[in-house]
């Protein structure tokens, strides 16, 4: 018997760039799935930058402050943040309003004349500590809320946090949803080069679930104008195209592909399939269909004989029969494709095994 890797060791990670501003990364393991949606806000919104009191404060405070005081446009909350919260409530229920953890608002007349309040002050003013509570406060004080400021500086990570909110156990399968707006000091040079801006703030939506591609998770993506079906189709097509090219270019690549995908085909099976495919110059799709038919045949045989299917070696006539059926399946309506087989294979055997494969 052959050993096989367990599902717990399986990992999947991929990234999709959706437009100039938005990207999505997916990380899947057997026990959890994490989706990270990042939206670059630097292209569409301005950040006001001034010198801070850090040269003096950092000698007094245990946690260092950034050396610049920055203010982000309040339109970010109105146009980017609140719609996400509305989408979450629409899909998961009004009670799934994201909890507000960190924010600091600038209240005043101009960028040179304001005071700051944070989430603790909002609670004192009887503002519900959720994104909906924040939204109502901003609407009611529209003329006075100038923007939101850097709220927390995580020195070890080089991240400046402007907004942080989350909700745990939002559904039976979704463990948490987190929404953050931050600027990375590590990426400052990139934004200086590309956008000619000193700060590049970004919005992050992080969704952690116990089931990948859960229905309501996909529904949320749809409400956020993220076409998951298109992402999946493009990714699958790209992988399939690359696999096809590599397998048609080199027979060893084809053997490796068949060995990985059809684990009950043994060394002799794969060699004989590859030999037939190469000698007849058959395309990758036909080779894959041949292996698929033979995989099912071996499963059926193993069940009947109570044996390990890997230990059963296929006859050349069985492989030839699968090749004829694969060509007929993939090229319907065309005259029968002439295939060359070894001389020791009888046509009667091929016909017999074709009937067996057809009935599986």
Image (spheres, rainbow, N blue to C red):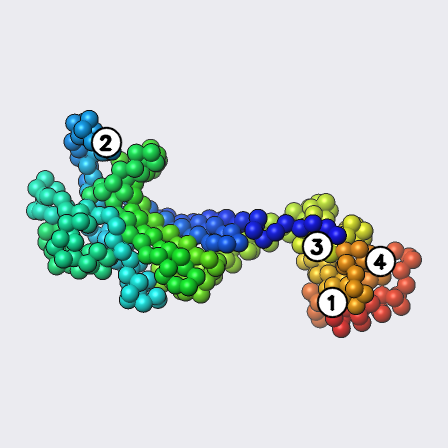
The residue singled out by tag 3 in the image is 263
Query: Horizontally, is 330 left or right of 52 in the view?
Result: right
Disc 1 and disc 3: Cα gap in Å? 25 Å
CB within 8 Å, label 1 to label 2? no
The residue singled out by tag 1 in the image is 328
Between disc 1 and disc 2, the foreground one is 2
Disc 1 and disc 2: Cα gap in Å? 75 Å
The residue singled out by tag 2 in the image is 62
Is residue 57 in sight in this rendering?
yes
* Secondary structure category for the residue under label 4: helix
Disc 4 and disc 2: Cα gap in Å? 76 Å
* Secondary structure category for the residue under label 3: loop
Residue 194, position as x, y percentages in the image: 34, 37
CB within 8 Å, label 3 to label 2? no
Q: Please give the name of the residue rendered at 58% of the width and 53% of the height, measured from the top-left corner.
A: 7
Disc 3 and disc 2: Cα gap in Å? 59 Å
The answer to which image quadrant residue 173 occupies is bottom left
The residue singled out by tag 4 in the image is 316
CB within 8 Å, label 3 to label 4? no
Q: Please give the name of the residue rendered at 50% of the width and 54% of the height, measured from the top-left corner.
A: 31
Number of marks in the rendered image? 4
| Badge 1: residue crowd in 10 Å (few <14, some 14–19, many ≥20) | some
| Badge 3: residue crowd in 10 Å (few <14, some 14–19, many ≥20) | few
Q: Please give the name of the residue rendered at 45% of the width and 59% of the height, measured from the top-left corner.
A: 228
What label sits on residue 276 in the rendered view?
A: none
CB within 8 Å, label 1 to label 3? no
Decide which of tag 3 and tag 4 comes sooner along the chain. 3
């Amino acid at each position: 018997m052959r050993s096989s890797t367990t599902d717990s060791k399986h990992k999947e990670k991929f990234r999709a760039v959706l437009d100039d501003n938005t990207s999505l990364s997916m990380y899947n393991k057997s026990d959890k799935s994490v989706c990270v949606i990042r939206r670059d806000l630097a292209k569409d919104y301005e950040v006001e930058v001034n010198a801070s009191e850090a040269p003096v404060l950092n000698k007094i405070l245990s946690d260092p402050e950034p050396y610049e005081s920055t203010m982000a446009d309040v339109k970010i909350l109105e146009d980017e943040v609140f719609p996400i919260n509305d989408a979450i409530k629409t899909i998961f229920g009004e009670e799934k309003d994201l909890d507000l953890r960190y924010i600091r608002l600038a209240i005043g007349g101009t960028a040179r004349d304001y005071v700051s309040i944070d989430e603790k002050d909002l609670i004192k003013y009887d503002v519900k500590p959720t994104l909906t509570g924040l939204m109502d406060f901003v609407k009611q004080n529209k003329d006075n809320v100038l923007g939101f400021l850097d709220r927390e500086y995580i020195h070890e990570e080089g991240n400046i946090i402007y907004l942080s909110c989350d909700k745990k156990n939002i559904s039976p399968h979704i463990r948490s949803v987190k929404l953050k707006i931050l600027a990375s000091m590590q990426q400052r040079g990139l934004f200086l080069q590309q956008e000619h801006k000193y700060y590049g703030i970004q919005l992050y939506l992080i969704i952690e679930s116990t089931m990948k591609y859960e229905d309501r998770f996909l529904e949320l993506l749809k409400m956020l104008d993220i076409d998951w079906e298109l992402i999946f189709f493009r990714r699958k097509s790209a992988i399939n195209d690359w696999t096809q090219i590599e397998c048609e270019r080199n027979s060893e690549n084809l053997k490796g592909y068949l060995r990985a995908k059809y684990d009950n085909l043994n060394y002799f099976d794969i060699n004989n399939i590859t030999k037939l495919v190469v000698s007849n110059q058959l395309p990758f799709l036909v080779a894959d269909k041949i292996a698929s038919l033979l995989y099912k045949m071996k499963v059926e045989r193993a069940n009947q004989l109570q044996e390990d299917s890997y230990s059963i070696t296929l006859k050349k006539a069985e492989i030839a029969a699968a090749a004829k059926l694969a060509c007929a399946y993939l090229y319907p309506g065309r005259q029968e494709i002439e295939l060359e087989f070894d001389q020791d294979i009888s046509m009667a055997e091929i016909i017999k095994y074709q009937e067996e494969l057809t009935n599986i």
